[in-house]
Image (spheres, grey):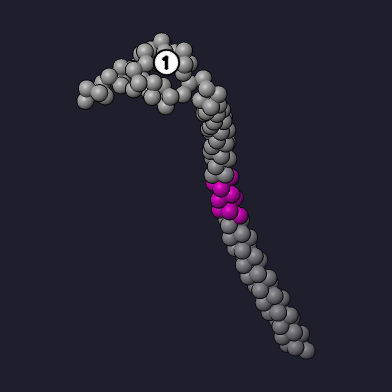
Amino acid sequence: MSELLLRHQFSVLLVISIIAIVAIGFSILTLAYLVRVRRDCQRLQSQVEVQQEKLQILAEGERGVGRRVVMLSQRLQKSEQSQQSVNHASTDGQFDLAEAEKLVNAGATADDLVRTCHLSPADAELLIALRRTERRI
């Protein structure tokens, strides 16, 4: 009977040992998995940080482009207003270059151009000088 008891105890110890070895194996596998998960998590965190830095750079660039667009829009608006005032001035009869050229070709003086076409004296003289130069060529 004692031999049977020894065999039974041995069998129980063997089963317990096998269970312990399997448990240790699972623990090692779990630990290895956790180490890998932690490493992957750190790698992903560093990638997130890199992407956040890139996003910050893009956001700063976008703000700079936005400021530039606003500035160019304001310049365009001023330019359009200036163009409209020039167009308005020429349609209001303040000066009409085509009419001034006809008068110069007909022999008008600078004073005539100032009175009739509302040109400045310097502009009138310039127009007459240009016509003289064209006639020489």
Mark 1 surroundings within 10 Å by alpha-carbon count, few (fewer than 14), some (14 through 19), many (20 or more)? many
Q: Please give the name of the residue rendered at 63% of the width and 70% of the height, measured from the top-left corner.
A: 25
| Residue annotated with mark 1 | 113
Q: Is residue 62 above or below residue 77?
A: below
User: For residue 22, which quarter of the picture?
Assistant: bottom right
Q: Is residue 11 above or below residue 84?
A: below
Which residue in the rendered view is the most extreme toward the front?
106
Q: Which percent across, then down, holds residue 120?
A: 44, 13
Question: In this figure, what is the number of numbered marks?
Answer: 1
Q: Is residue 43 found inside the magenta-colored segment of the image? A: yes
Question: Would residue 81 appear left or right of 131 to someone viewing this image?
Answer: right
Name the secondary structure under disc 1.
helix
In the image, 82 versus 4, the foreground residue is 82
In the image, 100 versus 78, the foreground residue is 100
Q: Is residue 10 found inside the magenta-colored segment of the image? A: no
Magenta segment: 41-52
Q: Which percent across, then down, holds residue 110?
A: 38, 12
Q: Please give the name of the residue rendered at 26% of the width and 24% of the height, measured from the top-left corner.
A: 134
Q: Is residue 136 visible?
A: yes
Please name the amino acid that badge 1 sits on. Answer: Leu
Question: Would residue 115 appear left or right of 37 to someone viewing this image?
Answer: left
Q: Please give the name of the residue rendered at 26% of the width and 21% of the height, measured from the top-left corner.
A: 133
In the image, 120 versus 132, the foreground residue is 132
User: For residue 101, which quarter of the picture?
Assistant: top left
Q: Quadrant of the C terminus?
A: top left
Q: Which percent across, then down, holds residue 99?
A: 43, 24
